[in-house]
């Protein structure tokens, strides 16, 4: 995946003469404000895009349940849901609803989208979290190492591995891992988030968050915790290793870039040892673009979670989305996708702010 | 990014083509990676073109010439070298025809998205103004969103749920296009913005050259230097997205055509019973093709960057006093 | 891997490196004794010896010998200047002294720092030598400092890399050296980031980080090339203090003969990888031996006040000027919430037909902005600017367009002045084609050849691509292109600043000849008073957007009125050690008189 730092996108013309940058702590505040304001157009565009795309196929109700109803029943449903009004009116109402937090109701099983998000969102968040941990644990240190031993065989090996994890689609990787570890070796469970018994327990404890690992820790029962963790291994590895490969190449490329800078040479001329140059001098400046891409990766992880959850029967948002897709329940799809747009925009905002925080040029 | 001095512009055109240039200038394992990638891609192209000749059966064929039905979930055998699926299709044939689908979709999608992305990026980057700002926000919004989900939505819209072969190809191709135009847009735009401030472009502006001439003569060819690399990265992404679409059921149905992702979705349930051949073969086909394309991309990136390019090493003796003999091996 | 965890790890690593126990036991007494005796205790023995050094690079075009058997020695407490133009190998020699070479380089011969051969020594010992035996000061201060760490941290890092120094001690030393190099409020500024310092201050920080390690020799690679003239004078002064007060030996690499005359005790001239002459400074300037040295010295533009008016007949006073600015203001809008930046704050100037107006100033003066505004590349925001009859305030492109053929522009950077994908002939033909004088580049070839000849380039060069020409050749081609339509006005924005001294001389000569033949008016923008003085009829001096002085060349250079002009003039180093010493005293007097 190409890495284009946001700075390259700024459309400001370069001044012909060197200009002293505006000094003062206002830098960070202003940056945060601008980025925050950008959330709205981003969400707006995506939500609009989804809405009108969905309308192109006709209204969702006809598409999903139309065949099963008589014309008058269909008319009734359409009228009740408001689909017989002019498109633009529907659009404005849709926007208004979103602002109020109402993303609609599914047409196949009549549940509010927000309820679906809340019920299953925790599972997806858990999966994404595991995957991120795996990705960071493997990707970043190995990437730094690869940059350090550049062009020698360990570097080639790491890059080959990184490319390999990237080339393997998530569902194929999951399939292979299942084959080896669940079927042939029998070490790990085949799928789902926990065995049926444990699931029952965790779903029913008072104040269940939906995030199994948290709930499991709250029970304090070692067996329960172990069960949850065992079920998490394969999905986390599947989704995580793919991202780890991307991080590895990203870290490696950025660090080779900063390792080639004059300031690293300057530090080297003062007798600073190579390992420290790599770990500290070259890594810190490379952090900013890395963190920014991490934000984009979270979006990718959300997409990937649809595939992973389906592969492993992990009942999260992605799994549910797939179910609704198969049932051709497009209202649900529209609602979930819109919600995801909001999540992605907010996540990117947070990530951008963190990156800006680390970069003193923005802060001061 | 690319090194102009790498290309001797006095040489005939074919020697100046992107991959050929790098092939001739590279050495060592960078070259090996490039060659491997090219070979793999060429192989898949051949298979895609000659699919009917290579595959023993059709992709939707359920019975042999003698009228005998194919076994269901049959393990690899002389008649079905890679076994059969639960539906009774020959795995090998489906993989071979799957190559055709993949190549078709990806080529169409990449060509269309590059054309749109480059033109938009160049115009937007060079002219700037409010059009530029709007396009940037739109492109960023699309770019940040999970590409697979967006592709699903677009695919639904286009195919309306039906799954004919050409319909499926078009749907997949267009959805991939929509998702990847922002990438080309961003890259070309960034270059155009940079070039806008270069001395030779400003020189043309001082002269009073009209904007269109500046864009075509000065900006366009100079902003597309990193395209071959982006192209390979996106091609590999596109292959994976297509497989993802197929996996989730938005590609092409089994009787309409062959698609690796779809086959993998069917194979998932086979795994529990230890049936491996229905999933492993299509999966490996995907992996190898993406590997090939990515190898080309990675080595293009390394070779084009003068800092990363490996050069033929000088063999020499370092002595303490004076004489340094060098056996230059550079051609 | 959190930031905090990283820092912890980094801190833990310092001073506990296993293999340098000997370093850790080095007591502070050792350091004190070294600094009190000056440098190396061995009296008179050289602190650095370069012995038949050869450096070869593996490039796309084959093996390139950058340095071919160079031998030098640096004695304690002296400044050795290594002079040469691009390609001479001087920078490579300097970097080889600390073995800071990329992997594509192969080194031969030996470089002795504190008695140890840097070329052949092992990595561990090399690391110990770096910083303590020799330290480097780099050319570009903004890239030599890591933007994400405070300056104090970076200085301290060098100290702690050699062991035996605690964080507190390192910080105290850093503050001490910041003060010594002239950074005000060092206790506070030690925690500031590089971008919070000006260019000159950044260079002081870099010098401080080199000094803090108390090296036997400081190697300064073009330390003032990226700085303004006035700042350059300050940094040179600082380096002189390093020699006088700290007793450091300095190797300074430069292409500027004025700098050499100002600072050096001994000079070594390099050309194409070899040392062609080596002599004490006074001797070199008074009686150069090698041909190349003589050529180099002859090519340096001299400050002669009389050049401008002696060359041509007086320009009539009552002719309508081609360009007329009154109260010209150019402002750049600030980003969200920040104030606008005023690049030009009310400037009056005239350019009459056939005259050369030199526009002088340092960075941030607004001189380039004015040049661009006249060419219609930048919009003006206030006052009035009349260019060839068109008022530029709020102008419409189609009104100005017909005048564009009367304006030519030469840019500073030869590397980016041409479209890399077009041949020189196609580039030079561009004005002719755009304005309809010729149908296409091929039809224009005859005129292109004439133009190339006029700038002393063989017609065959028209078939070459820009990267196949040298910097000087490209600037000449750029001149050819800008003169293709016989413009009335030629704007030259620092056209020779990126060129070597000898090349610069030829291009300036060419410019003069062409100006006399074709009689165009010119706005010649430069930061170099000597260059401007050699070409212009009149000079205008800019400072931070204001025009502080204007007049004929003789007036401005001979009897400057404004203190800034006087300072600018006094800061410019001339290639004559005796005269330069004199000028230094004048500059000091000026500064003491107040600024």
Image: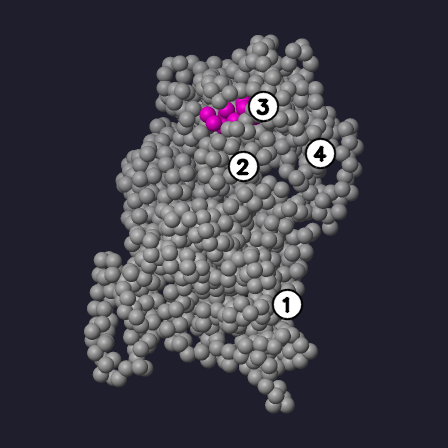
Q: Residue under mark 1: which chain is it in?
A: B
Same-chain status of marks 1 and 3: no
Q: Of residues C160 and B116, which is closer to you in this image?
A: C160
Q: Residues within 10 Å of mark 4 (few under 14, many from 20)?
A: many
Left or right: residue C423 compared with residue A235: right
Viewer-side residue, C214 vs A103: A103
Badge 3 marks a residue whose secondary structure is loop
Q: Start and end of the magenta stretch?
A: C152-162
Give the SS element for disc 1: helix
> Seen from this angle, which residue lies furthest bottom?
B66
Residue drawn 65% across and 52% down? B30
The residue beneath circle 4 is C107
Per the rendering, the mark at residue B42 is: 1
In this view, B46 is above or below C190: below
Quadrant of the rendered structure where residue C269 is? top right
Q: Name the residue under label 3.
A: C162
Q: Can residue B70 be seen in this view?
A: yes
Q: Which labelled disc corresponds to residue A279?
A: 2
Residue A289 vertical position relative to residue A234 in the rendered view, above or below: above
């Amino acid at each position: 995946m190409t890495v284009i730092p946001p700075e390259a996108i700024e459309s400001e013309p370069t001044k012909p003469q060197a200009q002293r940058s505006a000094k003062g702590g206002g830098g960070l505040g202003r940056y945060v404000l601008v980025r925050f304001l950008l959330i709205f157009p981003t969400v707006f565009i995506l939500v609009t895009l989804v809405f009108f795309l969905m309308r192109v196929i006709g209204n969702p109700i006809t598409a999903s349940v139309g065949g099963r109803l008589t014309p008058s029943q269909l008319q009734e449903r359409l009228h009740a849901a408001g689909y017989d009004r002019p498109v633009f009116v529907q659009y404005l109402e849709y926007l208004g609803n979103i602002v109020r937090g109402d993303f609609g109701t599914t047409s196949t099983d009549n549940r509010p989208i927000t309820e679906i998000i809340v019920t299953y969102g925790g599972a997806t968040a858990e999966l994404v979290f595991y995957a991120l941990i795996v990705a960071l644990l493997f990707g970043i240190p190995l990437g730094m190492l690869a940059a350090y031993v550049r062009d020698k065989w360990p570097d080639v090996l790491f890059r080959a591995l990184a490319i390999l994890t990237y080339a393997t689609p998530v569902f194929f990787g999951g399939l292979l891992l299942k084959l080896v570890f669940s079927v042939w070796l029998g070490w790990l469970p085949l799928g789902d988030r926990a065995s049926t018994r444990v699931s029952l327990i965790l779903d029913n404890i008072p104040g269940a968050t939906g995030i199994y690992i948290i709930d499991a820790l709250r029970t304090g029962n070692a067996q329960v915790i172990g069960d949850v963790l065992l079920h998490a291994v394969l999905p986390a590895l599947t989704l995580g290793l793919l991202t780890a490969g991307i991080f590895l190449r990203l870290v490696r490329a950025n660090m080779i870039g900063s390792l080639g800078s004059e300031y690293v040479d300057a530090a080297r001329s003062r007798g600073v040892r190579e390992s420290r140059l790599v770990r500290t001098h070259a890594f810190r400046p490379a952090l900013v673009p890395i963190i920014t891409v991490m934000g984009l990766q979270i979006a990718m992880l959300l997409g990937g979670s649809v595939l992973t959850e389906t592969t492993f029967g992990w009942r999260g948002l992605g799994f549910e989305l797939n179910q609704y897709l198969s049932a051709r329940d497009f209202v649900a799809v529209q609602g979930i996708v819109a919600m995801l747009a909001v999540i992605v925009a907010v996540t990117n905002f947070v990530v951008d702010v963190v990156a800006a925080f680390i970069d003193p040029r923005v802060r001061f | 990014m690319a090194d102009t001095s790498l290309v001797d512009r006095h040489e005939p055109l074919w020697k100046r083509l992107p991959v050929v240039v790098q092939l001739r200038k590279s050495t060592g394992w960078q070259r090996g990676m490039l060659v491997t990638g090219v070979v793999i891609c060429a192989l898949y192209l051949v298979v895609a073109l000659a699919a009917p000749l290579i595959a023993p059966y059709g992709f939707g064929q359920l019975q042999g010439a003698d009228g005998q039905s194919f076994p269901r979930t049959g393990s690899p055998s002389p008649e079905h070298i890679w076994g059969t699926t639960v539906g009774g299709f020959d795995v090998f044939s489906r993989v071979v025809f799957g190559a055709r689908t993949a190549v078709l979709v990806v080529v169409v999608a990449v060509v269309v998205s590059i054309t749109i992305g480059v033109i938009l990026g160049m115009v937007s980057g060079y002219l700037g103004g409010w059009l530029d700002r709007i396009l940037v926000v739109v492109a960023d919004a699309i770019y940040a969103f999970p590409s697979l989900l967006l592709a699903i939505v677009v695919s639904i819209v286009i195919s309306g749920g039906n799954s004919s072969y050409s319909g499926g190809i078009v749907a997949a191709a267009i959805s991939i296009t929509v998702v990847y135009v922002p990438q080309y847009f961003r890259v070309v735009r960034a270059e155009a913005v940079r070039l806008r401030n270069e001395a030779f472009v400003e020189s043309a502006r001082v002269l009073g050259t009209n904007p269109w001439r500046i864009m075509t003569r000065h900006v366009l060819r100079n902003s597309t230097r990193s395209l071959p690399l982006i192209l390979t990265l996106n091609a590999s992404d596109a292959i994976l997205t297509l497989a993802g679409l197929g996996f989730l059921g938005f590609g092409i149905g089994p009787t309409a055509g062959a698609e690796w992702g779809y086959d993998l979705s069917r194979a998932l349930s086979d795994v529990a019973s230890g049936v491996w051949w229905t999933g492993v073969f299509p999966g490996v086909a995907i992996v190898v093709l993406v590997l090939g394309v990515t190898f080309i991309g990675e080595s293009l990136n390394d070779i084009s960057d003068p800092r990363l390019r490996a050069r033929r090493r000088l063999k020499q003796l370092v002595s303490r006093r004076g004489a340094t003999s060098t056996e230059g091996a550079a051609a | 891997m959190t930031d905090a965890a990283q820092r912890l790890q980094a801190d833990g690593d310092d001073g506990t490196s296993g293999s340098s126990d000997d370093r850790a036991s080095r007591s502070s007494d050792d350091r004190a004794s070294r600094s009190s005796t000056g440098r190396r205790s061995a009296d008179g023995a050289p602190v650095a010896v370069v012995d038949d050094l050869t450096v070869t690079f593996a490039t796309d075009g084959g093996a390139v010998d950058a340095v071919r058997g160079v031998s030098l020695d640096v004695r304690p407490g002296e400044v050795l200047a290594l002079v040469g133009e691009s390609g001479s190998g001087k920078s490579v020699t300097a970097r080889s002294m600390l073995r800071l070479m990329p992997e594509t380089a192969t080194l031969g011969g030996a470089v002795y720092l504190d008695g140890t051969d840097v070329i052949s020594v092992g990595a561990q010992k090399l690391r110990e030598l770096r910083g303590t035996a020799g330290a480097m000061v780099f050319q570009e201060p903004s890239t030599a400092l890591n933007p994400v760490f405070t300056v104090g941290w970076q200085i301290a890092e060098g100290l702690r890399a050699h062991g035996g120094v605690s964080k507190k001690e390192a910080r105290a030393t850093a503050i001490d050296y910041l003060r010594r190099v002239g950074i005000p409020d060092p206790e506070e500024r030690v925690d500031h980031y590089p971008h919070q310092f000006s260019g000159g201050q950044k260079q002081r920080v870099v010098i401080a980080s080199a000094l803090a390690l108390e090296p036997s020799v400081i190697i300064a690679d073009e330390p003032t090339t990226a700085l303004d003239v006035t700042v350059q004078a300050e940094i040179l002064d600082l380096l002189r203090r390093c020699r006088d007060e700290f007793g450091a030996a300095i190797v300074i690499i430069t292409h500027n003969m004025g700098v050499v005359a100002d600072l050096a005790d001994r000079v070594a001239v390099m050309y194409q990888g070899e040392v062609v002459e080596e002599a004490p400074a006074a001797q070199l300037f008074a009686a150069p031996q090698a041909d190349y040295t003589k050529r180099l010295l002859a090519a340096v533009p001299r400050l002669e006040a009389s050049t401008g008016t002696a060359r041509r007949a007086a320009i009539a006073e009552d002719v309508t000027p081609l360009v007329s600015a009154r109260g010209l203001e150019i402002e750049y809008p600030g980003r969200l919430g920040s104030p606008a930046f005023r690049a030009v704050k009310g400037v009056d100037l005239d350019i009459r037909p056939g005259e050369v107006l030199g526009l002088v100033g340092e960075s941030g003066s607004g001189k380039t902005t004015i040049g661009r505004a006249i060419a219609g590349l930048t919009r003006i925001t206030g006052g009035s600017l009349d260019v060839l009859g068109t008022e530029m305030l709020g102008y419409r492109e189609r009104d100005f367009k017909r005048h564009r053929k009367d304006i030519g522009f030469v840019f500073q950077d030869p590397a980016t002045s041409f479209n890399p994908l077009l041949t020189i002939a196609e580039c030079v033909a561009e004005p002719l084609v755009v304005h309809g004088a010729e149908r296409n580049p091929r039809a224009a070839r005859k005129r292109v050849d004439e133009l190339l000849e006029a700038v002393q380039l063989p017609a065959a060069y028209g078939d070459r691509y820009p990267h196949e020409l040298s910097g000087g050749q490209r600037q000449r081609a750029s001149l050819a292109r800008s003169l293709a339509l016989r413009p009335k006005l030629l704007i030259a924005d620092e056209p020779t600043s990126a060129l070597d001294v000898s090349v610069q001389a030829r291009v300036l000569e060419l410019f003069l000849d062409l100006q006399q033949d074709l009689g165009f008016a010119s706005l010649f923008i430069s930061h170099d008073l000597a260059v401007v003085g050699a070409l212009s009829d009149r000079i205008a001096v800019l400072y931070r957007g204001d025009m502080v002085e204007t007049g004929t060349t003789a007036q401005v250079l001979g009897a400057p009125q404004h203190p800034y002009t006087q300072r600018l003039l006094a800061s410019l180093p001339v290639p004559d050690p005796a005269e330069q010493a004199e000028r230094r005293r004048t500059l000091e007097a000026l500064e003491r008189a107040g600024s």
